[in-house]
Amino acid sequence: MASPRRLAALLAELEDQLITCMRCGFCQAVCPLYGQTGREADVARGKLALLDGLAQEMLRDAAGVQERLQRCLLCGACAAHCPSGVKVLDIFLKARALLTGYLGLSPLQKLVFRGLLSRPARFNRLLALASPWQAILARPADELLGTSCSRLVSPFGPRHFRCLAPEPLHRQTPELHTAPGASGLRVGFFVGCLIDKLYPAVGQAALKVLAHHGVGVELPALQACCGIPALSAGESLTFHRLLAHNLARFRPERFDYLLTACATCAATIRRMWPLMGRDLTAAQQAQVRALAAKTRDVSQFLVETGLVAGGLAAADGGRPLTYHDPCHLHNSLDVTSQPRQVLAASPGWRLKEMAAPDSCCGMGGSFSLHHYELSAAMGRRKLANIKASGCQTVATSCPACMLHISDMLSQAGERVAVRHVLEIYAEGLD
Amino acid sequence: MRDQALIKKFADILGVESVFTQESDLLTYSYDAAGLPGQAPWLALRPQTLEHLGRAVKVCHEEGLPLTVRGAGTNLSGGAIPRPDGVVLLTSALKRIIEINQADMYAVVEPGVVTAQLFAATLAHGLFYPPDPGSQAVSTLGGNVAENSGGLRGLKYGVTRDYVMGLSFFDSEGNLVHTGARTVKCVTGYNLAGLMVGSEGTLGVFGRIILKLIPPPAAAKAMVAVYERMQDASETVAAIIAARILPATLEFMDNFTIRTVEDYSRAGLPREAAALLLIEVDGHPAQVEEEAARVQEICRQHGARVQMAQDAAQRDKIWEARRAAIPALARLKPSIWLEDATVPRSQIPAMIAALTEIAAKCQLTIGTFGHAGDGNLHPTIVYDKRDPDQRQRVAAAVEAIFERALTLGGTLSGEHGLGLTKVRFLADEVGPATIAWSRRLKAALDPKGILNPGKAIGG
Ligand SMILES: Cc1cc2nc3c(=O)[nH]c(=O)nc-3n(C[C@H](O)[C@H](O)[C@H](O)COP(=O)(O)OP(=O)(O)OC[C@H]3O[C@@H](n4cnc5c(N)ncnc54)[C@H](O)[C@@H]3O)c2cc1C
Ligand code: SF4
Ligand code: SF4
């Protein structure tokens, strides 16, 4: 039964965390969404006040709160700068799950999450069918960026989206089990949906780098999504199916680290899996904790293990390139210098910082699907900073950022290449 | 019916996207940073231009609607909490820096410009806007003027009041009133800006603000002085002033705050110290050298160990420790209550002693830090606001703090304003005649009583 009382009871579990927000408003300084809209319901303080309002039954409009809660990039800037240490993202994800549980999924969401995303094999087959059709539906917009825009009126609007790769990573390299080489280390490799389906070259670059450094790789077949789209929609059922699927494939005792080249997957596995795994068995919970503790971004791993010598000083000369900090590395995992060190170790390149490299690109996962205009407005600011840097190449560590930045550059007709840090580094190993 | 017609009227003037009517938007304008129970307004408006701001005020006047302006909502005394039958006017869309004039050294801004953004923009023009409230990364200049905000640099550079050269504001009827000028000297008409600064939104709604800028100091030097006795720290403050030196910042932290900051940031603060002074002198390089040496000597004479920052990194570290005070204290318990009772600087030891006594009596934890140079302390009470008993003890402690501050010749509020939380105590400080006079003034200027009713002077 849906009743405000029942919802308040559900939200009561968040109370200890909600109370820690002292309403100082400091999150206004860093929230990219608030920067665009100036609306209090868009900044963390406002959203926390709304959740508090529901929990205290001061307000009845649960759907209105859900809608505002979904207007958020989950970039974590608020949490990273909060003087009171409020665990904003934890609260938001838990609250999304509670609200979705209470209000239910839309039929389309049900289809996408429960029918597709939570069934990795079916999802892969469907996309394999879709891939050749894209050539007919889309026309290339920019060769350098690899973007397209739609030929027909499409649900993608003005977006310059990236086509599905002709051959996803799971076809190119269905699985991999190599022994440790010179490094003596062995890692699990979590591919992630965007790298698998849109940027397999990034995955290949990562594998090449690991092979070069004598790192053994355990890449299990038929991996599933990390679950962030489901989490961010508050769809706990799908999230738990995906988690269980992945847990069956990644055994922490088989590797020293669990690596991913996707900032979002890294943050999800490290920070969110342990948080959301409450309904799991004790053994599964222990496994989740072990995996989370072993999870690293690839650059972070390379620097931490000394495989890439530390230091930011690059050789003089070389082509200039600039770096964009993905929120999920910068805010959630505090990984900022490691990708830069990997770039510094890439021959032929010279890092030139753009203004505000750590400001959000505006992607925010499904946020950009639902609020494309806001997302694009943030993207254009990023674009201006990239342009002002004068670099012809922008590197980053997250395929989601790559997607959005490419879209922005392509729409503006800018000839700037968007690369993953590992692609740049891998090239230098030839 | 009237409601719908009115909403439509506002939407016709401001555009529908600037009118918020839904419960789940209005609730987010029900509070400020004071930690009081909130109160959602009937309507919130977000005018896109100054002209629209004025027209919104006019309609409020015609309809007799109470209105509360909201900048960043960081007020610490409940001044931004609206009335349930009232309107919140947001200035978040009015954030243009209209002019930075290098020749005449002033800036003209809209009220929603964020303090730190003006600071950065003036610096880029080789100029300096000194007022730096702890909330500067988000607070708006409209809010700063309405609260006469201070900051760390208050001792040497003064507070917001000292930088307001002129203002345009909408009176309660929505007419645009001008006061002051772009000139250093101006005696044309009444000094209305003097009246408007610190008026907490009860006398008019600020539009354009003209702010004085000054040349930035060429050099600065920071140091930390560590004391084993509170009294020595406070005598040092008096001795520095007696030596005719005005440090740009002269900050104080008590032992509880020191330990809390150290636990939180591991910055290497001496956990056993009774008090710290964090001092910065600035100005011409030669003068800075000389004054830093003098200040260091005075600190040592008063029994302090002194660490002088040798470079920019060490200097940053000192101020980071000070900035960590609120975050560190905030993490101890779910809620914090931040006071700003202010005493003449010679009374700081007496005030600190009183705070220790009050904390013990009310069984509360109070960490105190603040602006020793101007006697503006921030006793910070950490507690859990869900517990009615704790809430009651906090209220009792706050009352005792005010009582002591006034006995020591101080004031209820150095910089956070009276808002809703302190009006009750106003009579104790200024007496009935002052309140009566202020209310007559308010009644004459705002006969319908629509401008942020109940704040600053009560009524
Ligand atoms: C952690 C923290 C630290 C702080 N440190 C300091 C400090 O060091 N020094 C200090 O002085 N203060 C400090 N403050 C208090 C607060 O930030 C200041 O009072 C600030 O000036 C408020 O600005 P605002 O934009 O948030 O105004 P709001 O809170 O939105 O409004 C404050 C008042 O001004 C009125 N107002 C706002 N804009 C206008 C306008 N355009 N016309 C008419 N009235 C208007 C409002 O109605 C309200 O009464 C701190 C607050 C916090 C949370
Ligand atoms: S910065 Fe943190 S404590 Fe302050 S309002 Fe935002 S979430 Fe709350
Ligand atoms: S996660 Fe990002 S977008 Fe969401 S409230 Fe925090 S800062 Fe704003």
Image: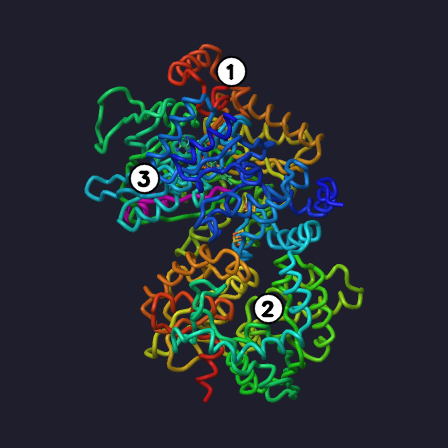
Say whether marks 3 and 1 touch (CB < 8 Å). no
Residue at 44% x, 68% y: name it.
A152
- Over which residues does the magenta segment extend? B275-293
Q: Give percent across and percent down for residue A400.
A: 51, 68
- B277 or B457: nearer the eye? B457
Same chain letter for marks 1 and 2: no
What is the number of the mark on residue B109?
Answer: 3
Label 2 element class: helix
Label 3 element class: strand
State how far apart marks 3 and 1 are (Cα). 35 Å
Q: What is the three-letter code of the residue carrying label 3?
A: Val
Residue situated furthest front in the rendering? A152
Q: What is the three-letter code of the residue carrying label 2?
A: Cys
Q: Which residue position is annotated with label 2?
A: A265
Tell me the subunit letter for badge 2: A
Label 1 element class: helix
- In the picture, which quadrant includes the N terminus of chain A? top right
Same chain letter for marks 2 and 3: no
State how far apart marks 1 and 2 are (Cα). 60 Å
Residue at 59% x, 68% y: name it.
A266
Tell me the subunit letter for badge 1: B
- B397 or A120: nearer the eye? A120
Residue A395 vs residue A195: left or right? left
Q: Is residue B375 visible?
A: no
**Nearest-to-viewer mark from 1 and 2:** 2
Q: Give percent across and percent down for residue B411.
A: 48, 24
What is the number of the mark on residue B427?
Answer: 1
Q: Is residue A316 magenta?
A: no
Q: What is the three-letter code of the residue carrying label 1?
A: Ala
Q: Is residue B221 above or below residue A174?
A: above
